[in-house]
Amino acid sequence: MTLTRPPIAAAAAASAPAPGAPARDTTIDAVRAGSLLVVVVLHALMVGVWVDAGGGLSTAVALAGRPWFVPATWAMQVMPLFFIAGGFVSLMQWRRMRARGATPREYIAARVRRLAVPAAILAAAVGAALLAARALGADPDLLAEAGLRIGQPLWFLAVYLGVTALVPSMAALHERRPLLTIAGLGAAVLAVDVLGTRAGSPLGYLNLALVWPLMQQIGFAMLDGACATWSRRRLTAGMLAAVAAVFVLIALGWSPDMLVNLNPPTAAIALLGTAQFFGLMLLRPRLGALTSAPAVARAAERASAWAMGVYLWHMPLILALAAALWAAGFPLPEPHSAAWWATRLPWVVVILAIVVPFAARIVRVDEPALRLADRIVRRLGAAATGPGAGVLRGRAVSAIAHPAVFVPAAIAGTSSALLVGLDEPVAALAATGLLGAAAVGASIRSLPAAATLSVAASPFLPILLRAAERGMGARRTARA
């Protein structure tokens, strides 16, 4: 990707939104909504649930292993595009907050609150439901399968929390050296692949911390007009070059399956994301014309508001629907049979008809939960500063207000649900508690000790925060 670096003065001016600038980009909202729709449909089709010869419920991962499935993953793998669109929106939000005088810590805290609270609600509700089902005599193997499948999509939330926490620092790098930042991340991704994944080493999982920030940086570049003046022919050439590079990797031993390349993410996924960037730039004028219609813009904005609810709850609702159909005696055909294919369209339509309205309503629970977090913060503040509080209690309360504590807590909470499964009461309780603690820590707004605390468990985050704050100071000095 070729980026033309603007003059320093122009870059500084670009870092603040113009007065009256729109708060959202409806095209990007539509892209995020479309990506999420693909994810929900894919997961709905991959749920294989049928009634076996004995009348019991059997499960399997449908579609996988079909000869046409690997090529289809190239079209269905939209996670790079989702992170690119997320980077676009995140940088827009950070610049708006920064223009109002917000600090990096305030941005991170606001984002963690909005991500951790709905995840904590999910962990608590699903954990309680599976525990009740176990008490009523449900098959433990089916409950374990359900807990695993519901927890699997949470890998995205764990990664997104980490990537979001790096937005202020990565934005500072982007505004100084956009091309060098992207090139450096890309080189690191390839190096990890060669040294780790290709050698069969767990080192490949380091790419979780490289591939998705790289996609986010491409989103930053898109916001600042990267390749916006390119001709359609040049954009097409860029897209085809990225696809050709994927084929080169496949010839060198990388998997052609883009779901395999997701765990851990590889250079093939990064190149697919680059191709998706160029494809989006090709389509953006037409998408912009389409999404400029008021009705479409409103629909895209609503979809963006419901996105977290849809993502978190689509798997529990899909599995609940399957269990309800089985309990009611409805036929559940075996995956890949003629009857199974014939029922896939109504199956997907019913799932969307359930998931979307549910997501629109479940987001209303977030606000009372956020108010609860604020009440807990007030009590913690009173406990930390009241008579007999003591130094240790005050420092403990201050510690959870630091991003180096509440961000890893949120990641650990989602990871416990992902790795252990929400069918295990301890894992569900741990996920709920850690995510709730992260939301409370992010809700603490004015504890001076939190600004200087150094936490050994996550040493890089305070360093990056201080770097971002120094960058903000330098920009203010330059403007003065």
Image (cartoon, helix red, strand yellow):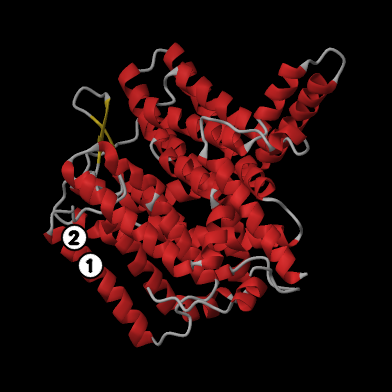
Look at the picture and state if 84 lies above or below 39. below
**Residue that mark 2 sits on:** 249
Look at the picture and state if 386 lies above or below 355. above
Say few, some or many: other residues with alpha carbon within 10 Å of mark 2 (under 14 / 14 to 19 / 20 or more): some
Residue sticking out furthest to the right: 387
Label of residue 319 in the image? none
Residue at horizontal 63%, vertical 73%?
Answer: 14
Q: Is residue 247 left or right of residue 294?
A: left
* Element marked by disc 2: helix
Q: Nearer the viewer, residue 148 or 191?
A: 191
Amino acid at pointer 2: Leu
* Picture coordinates of residue 373, whole percent (x, y): 71, 31
Q: Is residue 334 left or right of residue 38?
A: left
Amino acid at pointer 1: Ala
Look at the picture and state if 294 lies above or below 157. below
Q: Nearer the viewer, residue 386 or 145?
A: 386
Residue 331 visible here: yes
**Residue that mark 1 sits on:** 245
* Picture coordinates of residue 274, whole percent (x, y): 35, 66
Looking at the rendering, which quadrant does residue 100 occupy? bottom right
Residue at horizontal 70%, vertical 35%?
Answer: 450
Residue 63 visible here: no
* Picture coordinates of residue 429, whole percent (x, y): 52, 20
Total labels: the figure holds: 2
